[in-house]
Amino acid sequence: FVSSSPHGRRRLTHTTTAWSPARIRLVSRSAPSRNPLRRSSSSSEPAPGVAGDEGEYVDREVEEDRDERYGFEMEVRKLPGKKNRRLVRARVRVGAPLRAVWATLTDYEGLAGFIPGLSECRLLHQDKAFARLYQVGEQDLALGFKFNAKGTIDCYEGEMELLPESGARRREIDFNMVDGDFKVFQGKWSVQERRAKLVDGAGISAGQEFQTTLSYVVELEPKLWVPVRLLEGRICKEIKTNLICIREEAERIQRLLDE
């Protein structure tokens, strides 16, 4: 995930990496886990490649999850010709400016303190625009399994970008798992902030407000002996949890700065 550099700069990886190298063992459960994805469609079928309430699997090409409370959206897509690979896109609205979100994302060694399921996040190496992290995490799976994951993630921090057409600015971090239990685990964190002018009832300018969105995209494929349909539901639930936790931590940091 993320941590501060000796130069006051920060870098990111992601909470999802909490699922890297892994061992699977059976543990006692009273009932299988329920599908964590809430689809936007009215279909009663389980999510694509995700265990349903009876532990059965149904393949669908695209799955969506929305939560208006947090301005959260997520899409899971099966990739053509890649049966065991998924592309996940997610974003959440954040009530804090870009700088606070960025500081949260790049607090590499502090991530385990507020990200559930991430038991360790260690900074192995850091340069001006690069960080290598070692992460350990554990998630419960459907059908009474646990997924213990370890992985080494390389993170590449981008410079601030100005987007004249939208009046926004954006900063991104690309990440890639270089060692772990995923054959493919790569993607990007993106923080975008747009400032909007505020006017009072008389049409007089009353300052500005920021509108910040935290986005996350990851393409993942487990090693052949770990079927993605067994992990998909839990991975999506963890992504949602992670984004909301980052949102809450960024908003907490901003409150402290305001005080």
Image (spheres, rainbow, N blue to C red):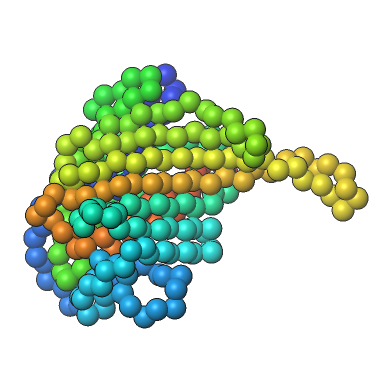
Of all residues, the one furthest to the right in this rendering is 202
**Coordinates of residue 125 in the picture (x, y in percent):** 26, 24
Q: Is residue 106 visible?
A: no
Q: Is residue 149 left or right of residue 196?
A: left
Q: Position of residue 38 (x, y in %)?
A: 40, 70
Q: Residue at x 20, y 34 (%)?
A: 178
Residue at x 17% of width, y 37% of height: 179
Q: Nearer the viewer, residue 30 or 234?
A: 234
Rendered position, 244 above or below 177: below
Name which residue lies at 19% across and 40% down.
Answer: 151
Q: Is residue 119 above or below residue 63?
A: above
Which sits in the foreground, 215 or 245?
A: 215
Q: Is residue 138 left or right of residue 77?
A: left
Report whether 84 appears left or right of 128.
left
**Where is residue 209 drawn, in percent x and y?**
69, 43
Q: Total number of numbered labels?
A: 0
Judging depth in this view, the residue of 230 and 85 nearest the camera is 85
Residue 215, above or below 7: below
Q: Residue at x 60, y 33 (%)?
A: 163
x, y percent for residue 1: 33, 39
